[in-house]
Image (spheres, coloured by chain):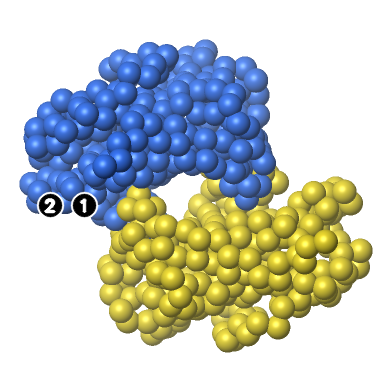
Chain colours: A blue, B yellow
């Protein structure tokens, strides 16, 4: 019997076509990569889609936080290494280390996953997955946990957006990458030419669907932004960005 | 001395997170994959980014056409095999075969590439790349070439869109995948639940940039749509879709 891998690494190469305007990995592609690598590792450990779907549950990403000292650049080889940090019957914590060009660590990621039942859309009890505790890895993830993101209501910009076909994922909800795009799009291009998102936080509250019209509200201070995506009074997701000079 | 590969295959696995609402590979991700595989093969043959940038030229995708009998589905292994079909001093034709689960061919792609000079934005003369002719492969690509896409002006739907940060690529133009999204978004979700894009054609005319506001105009008939993305009177790209029942 082979030991399940307590740590899993996916190697990437950043092609020119994948780069954003700053010739770097974009925040939305990084988030998509994080979800991909989490899915792959969960499948390898036997705690993925197939196992959960037997009880008609699916994993849902609840919170994600990353910190980077720089983004992978065009033609960089980069990798995401993931491990399970903690688990209880409500949540699983999964962390990631991001490296470029072999072994230089450029950042870390914290994610919090819950499961919901496909039929009831309610939170699922994860007790039956308690063998996940066997895979817990005590590797260090040296970035702060996400604290509650609370807009103060003094947003300076509000834009609206109606979710369309290409925004919808296989669960008929808006895909996480699209929320990240709406958040990143709250700044103009020249902001990102001069500054980078050095810490990115997002918390998912409710699911949006095809045709839902949302407001995107930004509160900006010197180096921090709080962005709320809301459908009327219902929060869909909240984000906090920290911008640092390049 | 090793012989350059006249044919190159990239294998993919379609994760749940990558699927669209129909639990399939989306047209926009397929187009991104096509560009990725073209780039990889060009680099392998020594006719990629590095070679062209020596003369301050870059490859630009001019036309793309694909036909599929079905799309790769969730958890399918699929592959894109590419080869150079033809070359002259203005254009290079590159084709692709798409397979799922080993060897079942589900479709083909035709692409037409030009090169432009980064400084002048004018078409580059490709004569100095004539060694590409050594890599021409006579493998068959059994789908029709793209004919001219000409809207008749009787569009039934017009939406507008302003290009934002996440739409911009490393050349500071709108990325091709975003155009495909705008085109696909011209139908509602239930259209794609019942029908699929069995043939997709796109022709790129002018480059759009950050902040450009465009109109997206659709002309629909029973099983064909012509979609024009235009900035005022200047066409940015034209597309023709053929829809077939699932």
Which mark, residue A50?
1
Give the percent coordinates (x, y) of residue A190: 64, 30
Give the percent coordinates (x, y) of residue A175: 34, 46
Residue A172 placement, left or right of B169: left
Report the front residue among B8 and A72. Answer: B8
Which mark, residue A107?
none
How far is disc 1 from disc 2 in space, using C-alphas?
7 Å
Residue B220 placement, left or right of A63: right
Q: Is residue A218 visible to the viewer in this orientation of the structure?
A: no
- Report the residue at 66% width, 70% height from top: B7
- Report the residue at 47% width, 72% height from top: B99
Callout 1: helix, strand or loop? helix
Of all residues shown, which one is farthest toward the right?
B128
Mark 1 chain = A
Quarter of the figure that contains the N terminus of chain B: bottom right
Figure check: B72 above or below B195:
above
Task: Give the residue number, with chain letter if any, for mark 2.
Answer: A54
């Amino acid at each position: 019997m082979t030991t399940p891998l307590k740590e899993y690494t996916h190697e990437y190469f950043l092609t020119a076509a994948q780069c954003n305007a700053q010739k770097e990995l974009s925040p939305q592609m990084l988030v998509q990569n994080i979800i991909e690598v989490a899915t792959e590792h969960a499948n390898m450990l036997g705690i993925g889609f197939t196992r959960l779907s037997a009880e008609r549950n699916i994993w849902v990403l609840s919170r994600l936080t990353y910190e980077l000292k720089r983004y992978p650049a065009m033609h960089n080889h980069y990798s995401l290494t993931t491990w399970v940090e903690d688990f209880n019957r409500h949540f699983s914590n999964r962390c990631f280390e991001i490296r470029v060009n072999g072994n230089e660590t450029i950042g870390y990621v914290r994610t919090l996953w819950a499961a919901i039942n496909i039929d009831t859309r309610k939170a699922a009890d994860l007790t039956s997955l308690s063998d996940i505790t066997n895979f817990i890895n005590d590797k260090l993830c040296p970035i702060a946990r996400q604290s509650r993101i609370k807009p103060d209501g003094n947003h300076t910009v509000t834009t609206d957006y109606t979710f369309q076909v290409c925004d919808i994922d296989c669960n008929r909800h808006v895909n996480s990458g699209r929320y990240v795009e709406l958040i990143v799009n709250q700044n103009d291009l020249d902001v990102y030419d001069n500054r980078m998102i050095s810490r990115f936080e997002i918390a998912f509250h409710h699911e949006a669907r095809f045709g839902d019209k949302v407001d995107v509200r930004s509160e900006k201070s010197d180096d921090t932004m709080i962005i709320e995506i809301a459908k009327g009074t219902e929060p869909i997701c909240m984000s906090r960005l920290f911008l640092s000079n390049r």
